Amino acid sequence: MKYGLLTYEENKRFFNVGDNIQSLAAKQFLPQVDVFLNREKLGEYQGDSVKLIMNGWFTHNIHNWVPSDKIDPVFVSFHMNNTAAPAMLSEKGIAYLKKHEPIGCRDQFTADTLKEKGIDAYFTGCLTLTLDSYKVDDSERGNDIYIVDPLYSYPRPEKVFYNTKLSVKNILNGTAFQLGKKNKHLKKFISKELLESAHFVNQEPPSNQYTDEEKFAMAEKLLNNYAKAKLVITSRIHCALPCLAMGTPVIFVNGFDSFVDSCRFDGILELFNRIDVNSKTGEFTNNFGLKGKITKDTIVKNLEKHHKLADALKEKVTQNL
């Protein structure tokens, strides 16, 4: 049997390293990687029969769904975004998923959506919860605090001024004048000293500048950094979930207010120490007893609710490879 690993199509400006982190989670279960398969072109694959773990976000290219019959899929941690679901759940799409049921879903939203169509589906959580293979001994943990893409759904220059058409639109609708909102809101719950001393990480770097090998190396480096961190503060689930797996204290900052975003989190948010931010006012609540602001001396303990999901995922993937 040959084994495949997902790679990802980039847009013109940036790519998401979190996708590669999800592939690293799949890779650790494979005896070898024989072929890289682009997530957006699975319907075009015509090589040798290949086993592929189908974890992650699906899909941008709805016209290329369903995958080739040369692909033997292992459905765990599968997310069908609400924007793609109507097209993916065509008669052909439903038949494909029923052929490979039960479908292990990354979030409860996906599981419920598939069940409504008569597809046997269940919630697994994300495969990145199994990245405890990157865990280090506590003696290696330093004092570095990482702030990773906090409140990244807020207006930011690279999105507001993505192209001329969007620039004009965002100036006219006022979005361009909200570029300071993120920092204003962060200052409400993170101390000035920490904002000045923490390592800021962008998990959405410029696109079309790196090979797949370089992108995987970038993902590996981030995981190794997070594994040794004193604390990680992030709005990226594919930073926060690996941190749970590696035993790194993590605080998830939830400032999402669109269903496109929130549908991804159904069943996942409960795993985190969390700050929930009102994206309009910046007012916030937390579920871990934070008094005042997060400082370099803030100590949090992860909720440790993820272990049952992680253990079940490991067993499921191992059984189906």
Image: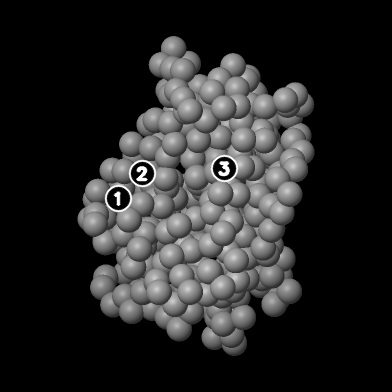
Residue 69 locus on image (x, y percent): 40, 77
The answer to whether residue 77 shows anywhere in this view is: no
Relative depth, front residue between 183 and 203 = 183
From mark 2 to mark 3, how far is it between C-alphas? 26 Å
47 relative to 102 in the view: left or right: left
Mark number, residue 16? none
Mark number, residue 219? 2
From mark 1 to mark 3, how far is it between C-alphas? 28 Å
> What amino acid type should be assigned to the residue bearing mark 1?
Lys
Q: Nearer the viewer, mark 2 or mark 3?
A: 3
Q: Residue at x 56, y 59 (%)?
A: 177
Name the residue carrying label 3: 183
Relative depth, front residue between 306 and 314 = 306
Label 2 Cα neighbours within 10 Å, binned few <14 / some 14-19 / many ≥20:
many
The answer to whether residue 187 shows anywhere in this view is: yes
Residue 172 locus on image (x, y percent): 56, 73
Label 1 element class: helix
In this rendering, the answer to whether 94 lies above or below 159 is: below
From mark 1 to mark 2, how far is it between C-alphas? 6 Å
Relative depth, front residue between 18 and 209 = 209
Q: Residue at x 45, y 83 (%)?
A: 63
Label 3 Cα neighbours within 10 Å, binned few <14 / some 14-19 / many ≥20:
few
In this rendering, the answer to whether 228 lies above or below 264 is: above
Mark 1 / mark 3, whichever is N-terminal: 3
Name the residue carrying label 1: 215
- Furthest toward the bottom, the residue is 91
Contact, mark 1 vs mark 2 (Cβ under 8 Å): yes
Q: Nearer the viewer, mark 1 or mark 3?
A: 3
Residue 14 locus on image (x, y percent): 37, 59
Mark 2 / mark 3, whichever is N-terminal: 3
